Amino acid sequence: MKHKIKPILYIAGILLLFATCTRQPHASALLQQTDSLLHHHQPDSALQLLFNIKDETSLPETERMKLVWNKAMAHYQLEMSLLEDSLLYQAIAYYRQHPTDTARLLDTYLLEGMYLRWKEANDEAITVFDKGITLAISRKDTTNMLVLQRKKLEVLYKQSRFLECKAMIEDMLRIAHKLPVKEHYQMVYSLALVSQLRGDTSNIDCPEKGFQLALEAGDTLFAHHILRNHGCMLVGAHRYREAIAQFQRLIRLNPDFLPYAVQLSLAEIYINLGKNDSAFYYLDKAAQSMDKEQKLKKDRIMLSFKSLYYQMQSALNERMGLPYSGQVFRRYCDSITEDLKDKHNTALRQQETRAQLQQRNYELIISRQQMELRIAVVVSLLLGVILALIVLYQQNLKKKERTIRRLSSELQKYSKQLKDNEVLMAQNNESIQELQMQLSTQKASEQEAKLSLIKQLEEQNRQLNLANQNLQHQIEAHWKQLKSAPLKTPHLQELTTEMLRLKEREETLTGQLISTHPLVAELRSKPRFLQPEDFVRIATLVNKIYPHFIERLTEAFPKLTELDQQLCCLIKLGFSVSQIAVFMAVSPTSVSQQKSRMKKRILQQKTDSFTEGETLDLWLHRF
């Protein structure tokens, strides 16, 4: 039957593989991959994986909340709106109730604040950011504290709350030694910027420090950005000579860094200084630079710079007495408006196309799910039939194997009992011969005790002989049942026979190991009184041959005395009653009485002992 079941198992495996391949990717594995991608700031790749999870409602709560969270985190990293993440608050509440780590707990305040910011609920967003900052400070998480403070600064800056921005930046700079280098020079620059925006020129020289820190950190681009804005700040403070020096310094360092912005700033300075020719010169250069930039980057909208250009040109024309005309600037603004309309229309068409594709995708998903359901039903039915056949076969096979194991176990038990009975009968015969030899040399009172003991041993031998005959009949009956077992299980019969042989060989080797021991050999040939050190050697030998014999005996029967343990060791080694009597310097009758008392103590402690009517010697032989 075994060779017939293999093709069935192969078919079942192929069907399971087919069913597995038709299922969607495992959600938990995809979510783990997105965790790694978000950690390495690859949100676009993370979103692509998250879109592969189609049926969100079938996910367990943990995976569903993780899916909502990772989508929101990817949108945040891509600077996309979070307003469409309608389930974000559920995920935030879930992770605050189950805070697995400090970073994710603080991220709940970050995402909640950003969600409120997109809703234009700026005051509520600031309150949330403050809670997150307080928690980060209490947990000494500087990295996440800085992220939350930066987002709070962005909200305050957007609301033109420059005084609060300044106070917040000053607090951060008090722990400048704990800030990362990049955070340090950005905060120094931001302090000067917000101070100037609220009309405070006390920090106007801070950008120079930020410029040096950025250069030392290798952030050359941001250093040049600081330098240009420093010049603009000096212009706002009417420190025109210093501003010109800063712009000339920037041109020497990087002439390609926003040339039109630098040129417009220089033109503004020369207008304020009354140097109209220089102002016209830099205005013309700025117009050329903007046209060049517009050709290279057609999508670039430079409305603020163009507006500044036309304002300064109008101011110069008015100063020179030339007529003012805003037609060119209006045409430029109209062209930008048309471009924005075109882009908006294009975005609407793309959104419409995306919606149509999404609808088709949903239809394909539903069709695929229905196909998967049909395939799953068919596969389930086939697997159910196959499993039913396998279960029926296995039950039938196990039933036969249980029967054979039971017969084998009983056969081993009966064979061992037969051997034990034969050994005990041989010991009893030896004891009877020794007692008969001692009768002629002892008194009448002692002879009665010896005769009584001989009768007991003879009666015991008779009972053992009857038991052996019964065991022999049972063994023959069991062998007949094993031989009539199915031909498909000959290995079990062979194993049973081999186990019996190994058991017999084990007993033979154990007997040889005991008989070759120097002390045992000496005591068998010349019995003598045993000293305490002899009992120590005997106990060591018994524990070596029968592992932990004395420990097991003491644990099972704690009321046994040390004399009882010694007697058990001697019986275990196969010494006769007369030999034990010599070892302990007592009469054989005393040994028999001691054995009888010990058997009663064992029964008192464990009533299920000697259930098969065996003697103490046989019971200890099996223990």
Image (tube, rainbow, N blue to C red):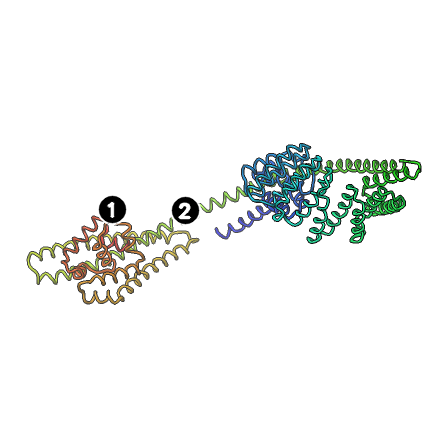
Residue 271, given in percent of the width and then of the height, sits at 86, 42
Q: Sort mark 2 into few (<14), some (14-19) or many (20+) by Cα contacts within 10 Å.
A: few
Q: Nearer the viewer, residue 310 or 566?
A: 310
Residue 508, picture quadrant: bottom left
The mark that comes first in sequence, 2 or 1, is 2
Residue 341, given in percent of the width and then of the height, sits at 81, 35
Q: Are marks 2 and 1 in contact (CB under 8 Å)?
A: no
> Which mark is in front, 2 or 1?
1
Q: Nearer the viewer, residue 590 or 16?
A: 590
Residue with the most extreme left position? 444
Residue 399's disc is 2
Can you say whether 611 is above or below 453 in the image?
Answer: above
- Image point (21%, 50%), residue name: 599
Question: What secondary structure is marked by label 2?
Answer: helix
- Image point (46%, 47%), residue name: 394
Residue 68, picture quadrant: top right
Q: Which residue is mark 1?
A: 605
Q: Callout 1, which amino acid?
A: Gln
Q: Nearer the viewer, residue 181 or 529?
A: 181
Answer whether residue 337 is visible to the viewer in this image. yes
Mark 2–mark 1 Cα distance, whole angstroms, equals 38 Å
Q: Callout 2, which amino acid?
A: Lys
Residue 525, picture quadrant: bottom left
Q: Is residue 442 left or right of residue 597?
A: left
